[in-house]
Image (tube, rainbow, N blue to C red):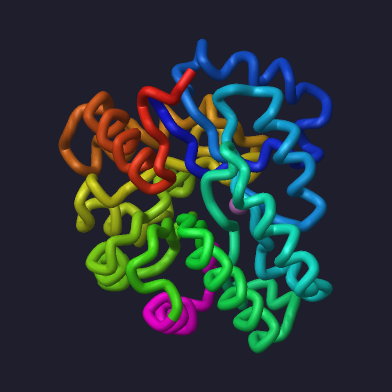
Amino acid sequence: MIIDTHAHYDDEQFDTDREELLRSMHGGGIGLIVNAGSTVESWEKILRLTEEYPFVYGAVGVHPDEVGSLTEEHMMQMERLLDLDKIVAAGEMGLDYYWDNESHDVQKKWFVRQLELARKKEMPVIIHSREAAADTMDIMRRHASGMRAVIHCYSYSAEMAAEYVKMGYYIGVGGVVTFKNAKKLKNVVSEIPLTSIVLETDCPYLAPEPYRGKRNSSLYLPRVAEKIAELKGVSTEEVIRQTEANSRKLYGLQETAMP
Ligand code: NI
């Protein structure tokens, strides 16, 4: 089965047809979805999605663009949510120097704080990093060693990907790998082992070709699996089988506990 390791079905872009869309997932070959947290406000919506749909799991965390008004009280709330059975990871969290919504010091502070919380709860982490390659690597080395992690929507060099793989982390690959101009990510996928790759959409964003620019959904993940298969010279079935095993390891999802 295909596992979407990073989606945002709490996003308002799904308000008109969320139920219909999610009900169509199994028919489209999508077996499991992990809905990543982005803001404190997203947590409640994510919780409801995990209660409503057996195949939807959740993560709670705060995106670096949204950390400006965080308090320790929010961290206590996050800690309690991480105890829930269907919350399988902390995140997304990290650094975003592209949008630069918050100062680098504020971003780093809450990134490290969320990593500490995840370590205390023995939870894997979902890392968002944009134009912050060196600082992200530095913080992961100092604060996340030995933890389970995925570097989501990976956008850096093959050399750095190899470093992350060596540290035991997974590399999240989504729609971008199908874009004509995505030479760098295609090279990353060719270079790193399939045992370190997980599939993701980041939907509603980053739809693969031929849907680029449209609203993304997990139903488009077969396009991503096909492209990875082509780049690695294996069958699409093999990509789906291996990335499922990788995703289960990353998030601790047992096969027997699945619907
Ligand atoms: Ni995301």
- Residue 205, quarter of the rendered image: top right
Q: In the depicted view, which residue is nearer to us: 79 or 222?
A: 79
Q: In the depicted view, which residue is nearer to us: 134 or 88?
A: 88
Can residue 183 be seen from the camera position used here? no
Residue 97: percent from left, percent from top: 61, 77
Q: Is residue 38 above or below residue 242?
A: below
- Looking at the rendered image, the quarter that the N terminus falls into is top left
Residue 11: percent from left, percent from top: 75, 41
Residue drawn at point x = 78 percent, y = 37 percent? 13
Which residues, given as a range, are shown in magenta?
128-142
Going by the image, does 227 lie left or right of 124?
A: left
Residue 215 on the magenta segment: no
Residue 134 on the magenta segment: yes
Residue 40: percent from left, percent from top: 78, 57
Q: Is residue 191 above or below residue 220?
A: below
Q: Which residue is situated farthest in the left direction here? A: 233
Q: In the depicted view, which residue is nearer to us: 46 or 96?
A: 46
Q: In the depicted view, which residue is nearer to us: 53 or 176?
A: 53
Can residue 168 be seen from the camera position used here? yes
